[in-house]
Amino acid sequence: MNFLIAKNNYYDKFGGIFVPEILMPALQQLIADWKYYRRSAAFKAQFKKSLSEFAGRPTPLTEIPRFAEAVKGPRIFLKREDLLHTGAHKINNALGQCLLAKLSGKKRVIAETGAGQHGVATAAACAHLGLPCEVYMGAVDMQRQALNVQRMTLFGAKVISVNNGTQTLKDAVNEALRDWSASFEETYYCLGSALGPHPYPEMVASFQAVIGKETKAQCLKQLGGLPHQVVACIGGGSNAIGIFSAFIDQPSVELIGVEAGGKGNKPGEHAARFFADDVGVLHGCYTYLLQNADGQIMPTHSISAGLDYPAIGPQHAALFAAKRATYVAANDQEALAALKLLAETEGILCALESAHAVAHVMKIAHELPKENIVIINLSGRGDKDLGTIIEKS
Amino acid sequence: MPNRISASFKDHKVFAGYITVGDGDSVAIAKALIQGGVNMLELGVPFSDPVADGPVIQRAAQRALENHTTLFDVLEVAKKIRADSSIPLVLFGYFNPFLHADPAAWLPQAKSSGIDGILVVDLPYEEGKNFYRTCLAHDILPIPVITPVTSTSRLKIITRYAKGFLYYANHKGTTGVRSGLPADFSEKIAAIQSATHLPILAGFGISGHKDAQEILKHADGFVVGSFFMKALEDGASLKELTQIARGFLEERI
């Protein structure tokens, strides 16, 4: 089956379009626009140009031998999405969607953001393309990521504080959807991860697939073969689906997604959706999510705002159900320790989100055959997290 | 026995009231509204992430959840209202709590509690085929939403599965009190009427007698939700709520 392109809006039994009737025409229009532009030579050429000349692609594949030695592991490489403009893989998707918005004639772009990375990426992409931008952000996240709020403002975007519910990413999504249901005729909603109603997971995965394509080509060129393990952190799942995409049909490559284990196993203390093994509908799609006995969506916790979300993208749900990828969790402390070890041994400061993937490799490295090649998708850089890192140290 | 919804529209114009169950004494609130002339009730099942609702109903849902209100509590409230009223009762909510409780298990209980219809905000017909079929099998009528931007072709498909009535959302955006109806309201209603014989209940943004009477010139009924919930939030007594409801039917000076 195809885990990247939806069949009748679904990946296996996951996905769909569960939205209020008012949004159906908006999504049908988006499906039609996406279908047209994804094949348009002009769109593809402009997207490629922005990725290389504005975002800074391709990103390198960096071997980290001193880290590998410290964890008694095999050869470990980082896919350096942290080196992209605005500091994370989010810019790949933001450029793709904002270009789609511009070419399809939308006059305004809205977005939600958790850690602020998608907000910053969208604000930058909008400035780059000359589109007005408004970003919804939970009040709690605005405090945690004050510098990113400043960056969005400098890029000319308006940041709107969301004071409802848990005041984090899921509430920012709610508010963006409310805005869009009144404004969709002139407004484009730039969703930040591979989730939400169809066609968003398909679009976002397609824009992030560049990570996987580059990684695969770099492996073949630099290492003469495919990696054994590809590891990525997973909030909604866009950086993970991006790097997995090139390896899904290579059964020898083990794909591992790392969720936020948070500060404990109790409900509300983590964002490990596969751990709870429960399905339902949130934000337009049927997928694995965290809910209570009454079907109410649970609050989540993670040291990293970008992984602090109760549902997982439908493509990952399908990969999990088909056992093509495995999903594990790393907790707050493990992520923090991994971030520090990587910084000390290699001079690379990664985002707390990406540190979850590094943490899992720390755990398994000593058990892996020495000739293995492990790739970690280093989805973002850690400058934004300095406040949290200092506070928790 | 025919479904109460179908019978209701045959007899009279409908004045529907929405309440978020679990925010305050819902049975008493329902009775106060009925006393004020409400002749159909929409019983809101609170959800943690109500993307189609404006701030008033969001806050009501949050309070209801703080009171640990579940779908089964809503059915209990329905049962108590049903004990001394025969007006149609429609469940109103988001899909996840309905799905999570296992429809085949709770729908029979809903029917025996006196529920006549169900409106699932985030379940368009494409996704809802199985669920709506199960509802119909228990004589709970699936009520679809039509909006100002629903195309004629989509309207035709929706009316094929719809039973009971159509819920017309007057405005784009979320629920909440607004001032006045859109200028093209009567044209929109006429367009729907030319595609279906189902009665039309109009809602979203109705703020007083004038809107209500304007709607009744064209449609078969109207719904008031946020206006009632706001009054309760602002501390209106049940007696005052009854008066507020009456105000939608009788002109005040």
Image (cartoon, rainbow, N blue to C red):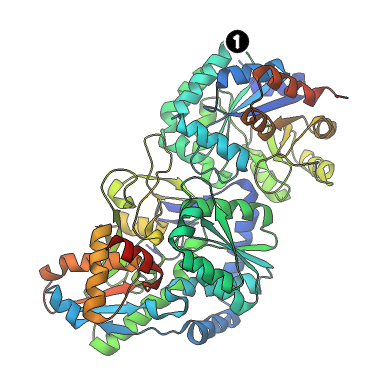
Pointer 1 indicates a residue of which chain?
B
Task: Please state the horizontal and vertical placement of residue A280, each as a whole percent of the image.
Answer: 42, 44
Tell me which residue sits at (31%, 51%) in the image.
A274
Task: Please state the horizontal and vertical placement of residue B74, each as a whole percent of the image.
Answer: 50, 25
Look at the image and tell me in which quarter the N terminus of chain A lies: bottom left
Classify residue A363 as left or right of residue A157. Answer: left
Task: Please state the horizontal and vertical placement of residue A51, each as a whole percent of the image.
Answer: 49, 82
**Which quadrant of the structure image shows residue A104?**
bottom right
Tell me which residue sits at (84%, 46%) in the image.
B183
Task: Please state the horizontal and vertical placement of residue A317, each as a whole percent of the image.
Answer: 36, 55
User: Label 1: few (<14), some or many (≥20) within 10 Å?
Assistant: few
Identify which residue, B198 or A109, lies in the foreground.
Answer: A109
Q: Which residue was labeled with disc 1?
A: B84
Kind of residue at disc 1: Asp
Look at the image and tell me in which quarter the C terminus of chain A lies: bottom left
Identify which residue, A30 or B28, lies in the foreground.
Answer: B28
Residue A331 visible in the shown view: no
Q: What element carries label 1?
A: loop
